[in-house]
Amino acid sequence: MTDDERYMLMALAEADKAFEAGEVPVGCVIVCEGRVTGRGHNLTETLQDVTAHAEIQAITAAAQTLGGKYLTKCTLYVTVEPCVMCAGAIGWAQVERLVFGTDDPKRGYQTYAPKALHPKCKVTKGVKEDECRDRMRTFFEKHR
């Protein structure tokens, strides 16, 4: 198992927490120099806050852990392609690398804001893609 797969499994565990709480099952883990510095899952329903996405929760936690707003040596793992808002936050935080599981053709940044990330951010997609996509499919089949 690669490091990317291992950390994506952690992000999937976060997504499962969201699913159990009735939230859209997106999970995120931020890793800096081999150490998990932030975790998060969607909390938009729980907090009644449209900005409480998994990535935002994890970025806030990582910044607090590291003692600064820039995550220049970090990799952000998220189960679903970030939305425009989250891609902007990832860009502002200067995350070095983004790894996501499955595309989001309806809301993803690649369609609406492909330049939102920091210019130096490297992107890897499709890690544990089937598992990430299945979580979303199962949730929406159950809730719609």
Image: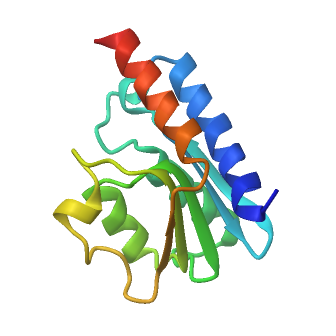
Give the x, y percent position of residue 120.
45, 89
Give the x, y percent position of residue 126.
52, 56
- Count the numbered circles shown: 0
Q: Residue furthest left?
A: 112
Residue plotted at (38% across, 75% down): 91
Position above or below: 137 against 50: above
Residue 39, can we see it? yes
Position above or below: 19 against 126: above
Position above or below: 26 against 116: above
Residue plotted at (26% across, 49% down): 105
Position of residue 113 in the picture relative to residue 59 (left or right): left
Residue 23, can we see it? no
* Nearest the eye: 51 or 64: 51
For the rendered model, the colour scheme is rainbow
Q: Which part of the image, by quadrant, shows the C terminus?
A: top left
Which quadrant holds residue 65?
A: bottom right
Give the x, y percent position of residue 4.
69, 62
